[in-house]
Amino acid sequence: MKQKPIKKAVFPVAGLGTRFLPATKAIPKELLPIVDRPLIQYAVDEAREAGIEQMIFVTGRGKTAIVEHFDVAYELEDTMSERGKDLSVLDSSRFTPGDIITVRQQVPMGLGHAIWCARAIVGDEPFAIFLPDELMVGKAGGTGCMKQMVDAYEEVGGNLISVLEVPWQEVSSYGVIDPGKASGALTEVKGLVEKPPRDQAPSNKIISGRYILQPEVMRTLETQGKGAGGEIQLTDAMARMIGTQPFHAVTFDGHRYDCGNKLGFVEATLALALQREDMGAEVRAMAQRLLG
């Protein structure tokens, strides 16, 4: 059976970025650069690689700069053209008019509520979700996380989440899956458990910031009460859908960097800089010098 294609993606970007103050006092956290590309750009590039065309940003007050990043900067481009500079560096930030859409999350009521704010734009189509704080980088020469998920979706349909295996002593910090049958990178999901004690965790596969969900999740969120932290939790809505629709996890073949905290942000910057052909050798030499 041919699945309905994934053409829309929701990016919840309304957070205040308080862990990165004062840097995020006037600049959205999602625009902080990993080397020379904003964090949100990595997520959007991953979406495009997976064939997604429409990007839906769920924003809050003071986040208009995210949209500006994907707009045409006429004065900048005109000045660069006059000076004979290469404009191709801006290609990844260009968009077809109408393919960037924003909605406001006026009150911070959790991830589930942020996704629900995009319900009118999602409509009756399956859609992807990207948490930009989680920078997912495919292995050298390999595909990105969402492309791996879309390939799996075309095979099994339904709902999918990306997962990664972590050491057992770390499971209590994450949401984990209760696994069923496994086949290659695909694992059937029988349940979702939020931050279980190590001795009660059903697996060491953690949910890692990428989702493909059917539109019915919006109806589930519509009637859902508040969960952990007094917020409307997406995990709770997904758990209610298990058993009514196919639900699978895709074990991501690549690396995850948690850029929601400073150490993860620094690690991502260093790791991606080391992979760059134009600076990798110099960065490695610099690190060795600093460590020496």
Image (cartoon, grey):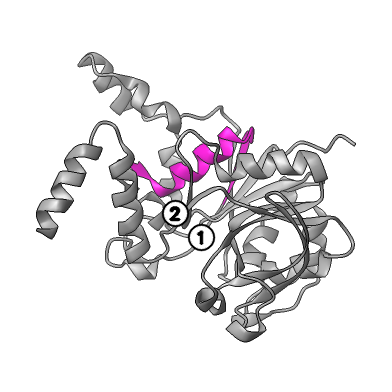
- In magenta, the rendered stretch is 37-57
**Placement of the C terminus among the 4 image quadrants:** bottom left
Point out residue 142 in the picture as x, y percentages from the top left corner. 52, 36
Q: Quadrant of residue 248?
A: bottom right
Quickly name the residue at label 2. 63
Q: Residue at coordinates 66% horizontally, 66% vertically from top-left?
A: 113
Element type where label 1 sits in the image = loop
On screen, 258 above or below 228?
A: above
On screen, 25 above or below 136?
A: below
Q: Amino acid at mark 1?
A: Ala
Q: Quadrant of residue 249?
A: bottom right
- The answer to whether marks 1 and 2 mark residues whose Cβ atoms lie closer than 8 Å is yes
Q: Residue at coordinates 83% horizontally, 56% vertically from top-left?
A: 216
Q: Quadrant of residue 54?
A: top right
Give left or right: position of 152 versus 95.
right
10 Å crowding of disc 2: few (<14), some (14-19), many (20+): many
Q: Amino acid at mark 2?
A: Lys
**Placement of the N terminus among the 4 image quadrants:** top right
Taking depth in this image into account, of 55 and 152 the one nearest to the observer is: 152
Quickly name the residue at label 1. 14
Cα separation, mark 1 vs mark 2, equals 7 Å
Give left or right: position of 167 versus 226.
left
